[in-house]
Amino acid sequence: MRTCIRLAFVFCLLISTSRLFAQAIPTDIKDAALELRDAAMQDSIAYDVVESLTMEVGPRSAGSAGDAAAVQWAVKKLNSLGFERVHADTVEVPHWDRGTLDVRINAPYAQSLVATSLGGSVGTPHEGVEAPIVRVASLAELRALTSEQLQGRIAYIDHVMERAKDGEGYSTAGRIRACGHVVAAELGARATIIRSAGTSTHRVAHTGSMRMNKIPGTIPAVALANADADILTYAVNSGKPVTVRLHSTARELPRVISANVIGEVRGSGKLANEIVILGAHLDSWDLGTGAIDDGAGVAIVTAAAKLILDSGHRPRRTIRVVLYANEEFGLSGAESYATNHRSKIEDHVVGLEADFGDGAVWEFSSRVAEDALDIIDELHTLLEDIGIERGDNEADGGADLTPLRKAGMPVLSMTQDGTHYFDYHHTVDDTLDKIDRDDLNQNVAAYVTAAYVAANIERDFGRLPIDTSEKTCAAEFDGDD
Ligand SMILES: [Zn+2]
């Protein structure tokens, strides 16, 4: 018995020391990945893709004619680039039309305001809504109001989003956009106005979705451009009663069939059925042409996979590009993909998503099993030369990969510089001229390196614990305001 334990101990020691000195990524795979990385820096595919999508299709919000055109465009584009098994997987999506919007201060003086409806907002009655303003600076302040204070009035949530390289300011601002109307409606408000969840200093308003779950009756919700929020705040601070009038024809239309568009670089050999996902979303908001959100992501993942396709090194695992339907309005494509592939979730070895514009990648993080971290460490050494720091193992992997991650799929994350992302995000200013070719290519370089390594090493990244948590407004209210 004792000999047996001793033998087991020696065996264990041998395994762990061999792991210590062994390479997590074999040299030939590293060399091929570096070749692809360097080729990506000189490439033009990514820019060509985002140019074609934004110029030939343009805005493509879920359920719109542009959405249908984008699906056709994507099938044609992936086919013409030589991807394999290109197909459109149908997905039912909501269809919301923003109609027209007019917002103006009526008292203490008249002033027209630049505003946009938030995604999913109902319109106003035909005669509009005119009511006094109650200003708060946070969700916590809004929640502290009584219904007597808000009943029959318009809630104005005046939170200034902070600019940050990692986009951190968006978590609070996005939460206000998503859930402010729920609180306001519960307290009897007639409408909700927020200061845009964005950092633009131009006179443009930022749209974006609201969380629609568990709302007791809906009220119109709009966002003001930062400059116009300043005007309204000044009026409120004058101490005189302020009334605002809103008129909106926003409305919900019947649901529509859209699609996730999928194309592959097929693997070969015994690992060919295993999948490395490269994801981005095909839909965009309707105001701009969806260049940074998420034409850039579509371009990055398509170009990365195309480089591997053309390299002559067929990967061992299959690289699957998934261009998701309707990310903006509630992850319809992501949920549908996870449901359709439920029996094959285990085949999804790892995923990478691109959905944060074209800013250069500055950090590489992951969420993988602990015993796969040596692979991440070595993979990072291939990214250092293109300016990428090593992050932690707490990555969330992106919105569209959430259902797969929660079902156990590990994720790799290329954190992009988001300093200017929220100047354009969800506005009329999200157009092709904001795309920087060199930064876009640096992204492709990072994605192709990681995708190539993930698709070719013998080992995998383990599995993540199953996560059943749900993101509701009630859960958000427990967070920090
Ligand atoms: Zn996006």
Image: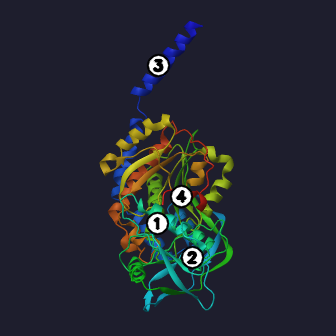
Q: Residue 292: give x, y in percent of width and height.
A: 43, 68
Frontmost of labels 3 and 2 is: 2
How far, Cα to Cα, is label 1 from label 4? 17 Å
| Residue position marked by numbered label 2 in the rendering | 150
Q: Are marks 3 and 2 in contact (CB under 8 Å)?
A: no
Helix, strand or loop at label 4? It is loop
Q: Are marks 3 and 1 in contact (CB under 8 Å)?
A: no
Q: Mark 3 vs mark 4: which is more N-terminal?
A: 3
Q: Quadrant of the N terminus?
A: top right
Q: Mark 3 vs mark 1: which is more N-terminal?
A: 3
| Residue position marked by numbered label 3 in the rendering | 13
| Residue position marked by numbered label 1 in the rendering | 173
How far, Cα to Cα, is label 3 from label 4? 41 Å
Q: Is residue 249 above or below residue 339?
A: below
Residue found 41% across the figure and 54% down from its top: 415
Q: Amino acid at mark 2?
A: Leu
Residue neighbourhood size for the residue with mark 2, other residues' Cα within 10 Å, grouped as few (<14), some (14–19), many (≥20): many
Q: Nearer the viewer, residue 7 or 99?
A: 99
Q: Amino acid at mark 1?
A: Ala
Q: Is mark 4 within 8 Å of ligand 1?
A: yes
Frontmost of labels 2 and 1 is: 2
Helix, strand or loop at label 3? It is helix
Q: Nearer the viewer, residue 228 or 328?
A: 228
Q: Mark 2 vs mark 1: which is more N-terminal?
A: 2
Helix, strand or loop at label 2? It is helix
| Residue position marked by numbered label 4 in the rendering | 399
Q: Amino acid at mark 4?
A: Ala
Helix, strand or loop at label 1? It is helix
Residue neighbourhood size for the residue with mark 1, other residues' Cα within 10 Å, grouped as few (<14), some (14–19), many (≥20): many
Any part of residue 262 in sight: yes
Q: Are marks 3 and 4 in contact (CB under 8 Å)?
A: no
